[in-house]
Image: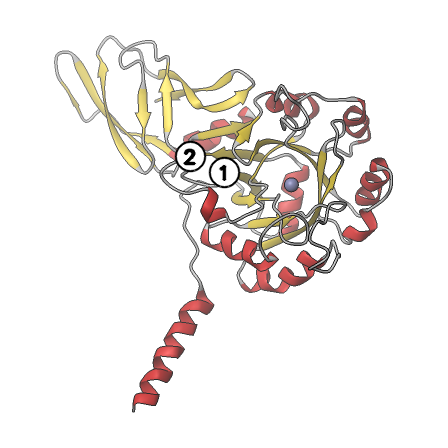
Amino acid sequence: MKKQITFILLFVFFTVLVHGQRKINRLPDLEGYVTLKCDLHMHTVFSDGQVWPTIRVDEAVRDGLDAIAITDHLEYTPLQEFVKNDPDAPWKISEEYAKERNIILVHGTEIGRNTMPPGHMNALFIKDASLCNKDSVWGCYEAAIQQGAFLMWNHPGWKNQRPDGIPKLYDIHYRLIEKGWLHAIEFFNNVDYYPLVLEMCKQHNLAVMASSDMHGLISDKYKKPEYINRPMTFVFAKERSHDALKEALFAGRTLVWFRDKLAGKEEFAKPFFYRCISVSKPYYENDKKIFIEVTNNSDIPFTLINGGKFPRTVFLEANTVTRIAVSKNAVFPLVYEAENILVGEKEFLKVELK
Ligand code: ZN
């Protein structure tokens, strides 16, 4: 009997383990698209990271992500005395593991040089990372592009390479853009962000990206109360699949989210905001005020500022209904700037409550 109970308990224990648990992020879809939550830049022991590749998949499940890419450094492998030097090993180890856990795994690598230019570049959707390792950095890009790669310029204002923290496009980046070989730039990297990237992406029609660039454990780094989430790229894809993700990225349909800040092109930021909130009809009025409710159905809090008439500022907490008492002199719709939605280097998204 005792044996039987032990067996049943073990069975329950392993059943729970096998099924795992995925966090639900309350983030709306755009009309005609599903919002895929992605982190396409992270490391493992196969370069200078501290974890085994499958841990990255487990972290993605726990954080409710749809897609990740493990992008170990091609030319920097300080642990090769202890682990095999194979830039495709993280992919080989995690491919099946990710499929079982319903995580879209993107095959990637990071092509780096110690100086800026050119800095570091992720090659995503490649087939064989080992073929990308060439003496010249241009040769690396070319080999990646021949495999159909999506090239993302990483942390363009990284202080180790750009002491002022301000990204700058150099000749080599313009050459990549001219050839149509550069597809995206990181706006958020780890805990840093680079507002100028929004202007670069708008001007050159590139995707705006956010990545953790994690080397240690996600749960150690991005924890409450300081952080509510890890950096995420929202990709607006036609369906939840590897190929649809790739199509959407090449089309540049992204927004990025970290802490309370959302950023990207207005054409995606505006409909996304309106999918997050709904405004009620006035439910009561007296001599001075009209009362309405604004519901924020998302995990992202919004701070609305510079309203012309009272109230000048509205804070819409995540997953919360906010009551607003509007002055009777106010003209509808109420116009605001969303202080935590960046659509340009110094530009907030303009929104209306109507
Ligand atoms: Zn990296």
Q: Nearer the viewer, residue 46 or 154?
A: 46
Q: On screen, 264 above or below 307?
A: below
* Total numbered circles: 2
Circle 2 crowding by C-alpha within 10 Å: few under 14, some 14–19, many from 20: some
Check whether the beta carbons of the residues at disc 1 and disc 2 lie within 8 A of each other. yes
Secondary structure state at the residue bearing disc 1: loop
Pointer 2: what residue?
275
Q: Disc 2 residue type? A: Arg
Q: Ligand 1 near label 2 (Cβ, under 8 Å)?
A: no
228 relative to 269 in the view: left or right: left
Secondary structure state at the residue bearing disc 2: helix
Give the residue drawn at x 52%, y 28%: 263
| Image quadrant where residue 223 sits | top left
* Residue 30 tag number: 1
Give the residue drawn at x 46%, y 50%: 64
* Residue 295 tag number: none
- Residue 252 spot, x, y in % from top left: 64, 34
105 relative to 144 in the view: left or right: left
64 relative to 83 in the view: left or right: left
Q: On screen, 303 above or below 92?
A: above
Q: Nearer the viewer, residue 97 or 288?
A: 97
Instruction: Measure the C-alpha gap from mark 1 to mark 2.
Output: 7 Å
